[in-house]
Structures are given as C-alpha cells and as structure tokens.
Image (cartoon, rainbow, N blue to C red):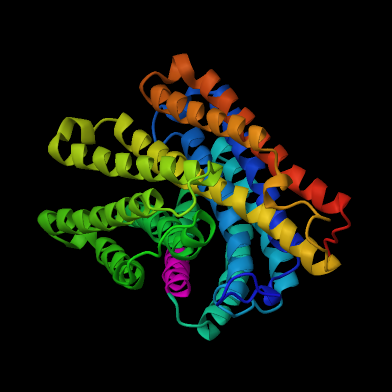
Amino acid sequence: MNTQPGLAFEQAPPFSLPLRFFLTAPLFLIAAGILIALTPDALASRWTPQALALTHAFTLGFLAMVMLGAMLQMLPVVAGSPVPATRLVARASHIALSLGTAALMAGFLSGAARAYAAGVVLLLAAFAIFIAAAAVSLVRAAANATANGMRFAVMSLVFTVALGAALALLRAGWWNGSLEGASAAHIGFGLLGWIFLLVAGVAWQVVPMFQMTPPYPPRLSRWLAGVMFALLALRAAAPLLPHPVVILLDAGLAAGVLMFAFHTLDLQSRRRRKLPDITLDYWRFGMASLIASVLAWMLAQLWPAWADSSAYPLLLGVLFLFGFAVSVVAGMLYKIVPFLAWFHLQAQLQAKAGTIPNMKQMIDEKSMRLQFRLHLATLALLIAAVAWPAALHVPAGIVLALSALMLLGNLSSALRRYLQHGGQLS
C-alpha cells in the first residue's frame, strides 16, 4: 500500500518499533523538568553537574530517542532501504539508550565513576548497534536529499559519540589526557551535525508532505548537509587555526542555519492548505527560535562581555535545544504517531473509509493546543530563569514537566485509539 508516490510504505516496520522510542522520550523531558525545579544550579552555569545532566536529558533522552525511532521508520519508507535485523536493533538500542542516558545523568549528578562508566558503555552499545545497522541501510539507500542528509547526520553522530565517550572517561578519572577543543567539537557535531542535519534531512520530505508546501529548492536540499558537515570538520581543528578563520567557519555555519530556517518559513507561508495545524505552529516556533539562537551568537561576536558571561551559552542552549530542536521534534511527533496509527490500522484491517479514526481523530486537537501553550510558557520561563535562576527555576521546571507529561498523554491517546480499533503491535 502506498499513500504517496516514491514512498515505500509497504516496507514500514511494525508500529511497536518506532513507537517505543516516541513514548519513552517525553519521560526524559519530565525528568529534566524535575531536575530544574529541584535546583537552580541546572541553569546557573553550563558546567555545573546539574546543567550537564540536564543537557543530556534533552540531547540523548529526548532528541536522540525520537530521532532513532524516526530513522527506523524513514529509512525503509523514504530511502527504500530497511534497517537489517530491525526488531533486534530497535529493542537493543532502545534499552541501551534509555539505561545509558539515565546512568550518565546519575554520573553527572553524583560524581560516581561507576555511573559514568556504565553510562558510557551502554550508550556506546546503543549507538554502535544503531549506527552499524543504519550504515548498512544508508549504503543501500536510494539517492535522494533525505537519505543524503541522514548520511551526514549519522557521520556526525559517530564523531559526537566518540568525543563524548572520551570526555566522559576523562571526567570519570579513567584517563588523564588532554582534549583541547574536544568539548567544542563534541557540541558542534552533536548540535549542528547530528541534530540540525537530521532535522533538515527529514524536513526535505515531511514539510512538503505533511504541511502541504512547495518543495525545498533542489540546490539547498542537495548541498546543505555536505557543506555544513565540511565546515564542522574544519571547525573541529579550531585550536590549530587562526582566530579569523574560526570566525569565518562559524559565520558559514550560521549562514547555513539561517538559509534553512528562512526557506522553511517561506515555504510554510505558501502552503496550499490554510487550515490550522499544530505541527505547523511547532515548526514556525522552532524556526523562530533557531533564528534567535543565531542572533544571540552574532551579538556575542560584537559584544565580548556578553560572550564571556555565564548566561550566553545557557541562553544559546535553551534557544537551540528547547526552542528549536524540542519544538520541531514535538511537532513531528504530532504528525508521525497519528499517521502511523492510521496507516497500520488501514493496512492490518484493510478497513473501509469511515470505519477507523482518521489522523485528526487520533489525538484531541484541544489537548494538543493546550500542550503547545505550555510549551511556549516553558521556553519563556527557561529564558527568564537563565537571568534569574534562583527565583524562576521552580516554575520553569514544573511547567516543563507538565508540558512533557501532557505530550506523553496525547501520544498515548493515539495508541489507545489504535488498540481500541483492533490494531496489533507485533
């Protein structure tokens, strides 16, 4: 069964495989909210143990969790190349990623070397399993912009994981080496390589498909991932480069980010269907936050005192990680989960029109709207808490946890409707 030309929906994995990732991810956002509410140190400096635990709750627990699930679904459907041993890969990587993220967060918070080691081993296992399987799939994948973006995102993930493991072992005292520039490279490959390039690669397909927009310009979708990855690779050698060259590389990366954001907003302004759409709202909000993060970086180049402040990297992280990445991923979940529930019901039951819920009936629209408002309030409180952590960390954390809990409830409602209408998870 094919619902859109060029997409191999008949190769889609069982609903339960990506769904386990999608339903686990909000749990780590809830944990992040609790952590913020319990201590102002989570938003006091980027280097506090609480801030490091918080960062990895966002990047590993929520973003990587959803992205791995999305790639399991998209590689066979969009790239036409199923992940080998899909069930084994999904189950093993999901368990290892969940436990590894929890152990790493515990290691940051407690300073226990054993927790760091357990986290590193489990995370290395999770990503090694997934990367190996994804690499086989991507080698066989059809040549298109989404598959190309995924290739560069996975290569960035390899560097992110390797550098992250080295930094964690160094922090645990298992190694006494010097990693000058490794932290910046880890952050660069993780945020702009893995997260941004994968979001962009997915956007080439899902924005026109789900939001009824014109396609992205072919030159942008064909070249952005490769150019950004090359700039990141050069940027990793920053300790060896003259400062003006580093600034030029950073400017090139910022330009690539802005091109993607403005093109996305332009396409969304020309969408064919003008009906309200919560996914569209999330994406527009995400693009605005992405642009704001670039503006914050530009201000730091012009104002050295701002660049040296503790608030600057925290604000940049809040805008990019939560404002952009979490927003876009949450918006995608509100399309992908209902679509998969509807598609698998249709395929399993060979149902006639009107006998099963349509996509819009899978999750209550009012509930999604309320959760989106909580999400907006969370970003506003997180930004304010960067300036006044002692005064605002409790409300920021509570609202984040409530927003994440409601996201989990909304996604779970799609699963309930799927099961109520005879859907099978195996």
In the image, is 302 to the left or to the right of 126?
Answer: left
The location of residue 281, given as percent across then percent down, is 48, 41
Q: Residue at x 53, y 49 (%)?
A: 329
The location of residue 155, given as percent across then percent down, is 44, 70
Image quarter hosting the C terminus: bottom right
In the image, is 155 to the left or to the right of 266?
Answer: right
Tell me which corner region of the image, top left, top right, bottom left or bottom right, holds residue 124: bottom right
Q: Residue at x 44, y 66 (%)?
A: 153
* Residue 180 visible, this orientation: no
Q: Is residue 187 placed above or below 14 in the rendered structure?
A: above
Q: Is residue 339 placed above or below 229 in the rendered structure?
A: above
In the image, is 116 to the left or to the right of 363?
Answer: left
The location of residue 91, given as percent across then percent down, is 74, 64
Q: In this figure, what is the number of numbered marks?
A: 0
Instruction: Depth check: give the residue in front, 354 or 204.
Output: 354
Q: Residue at x 49, y 36 (%)?
A: 49
Tell me which corner region of the image, top left, top right, bottom left or bottom right, holds residue 89: bottom right
Image quarter hosting the N terminus: bottom right
Residue range in magenta is 145-160
Q: Residue at x 66, y 73 (%)?
A: 9
The location of residue 200, given as percent across then percent down, is 42, 60
In the image, is 313 to the left or to the right of 23?
Answer: left
- Residue 72 belongs to the span the image colors magenta: no
Query: Secondary structure of the magenta portion, mostly?
Result: helix
* Residue 375 visible, this orientation: yes
Q: Among all residues in the image, which is located at the extreme bottom?
A: 140
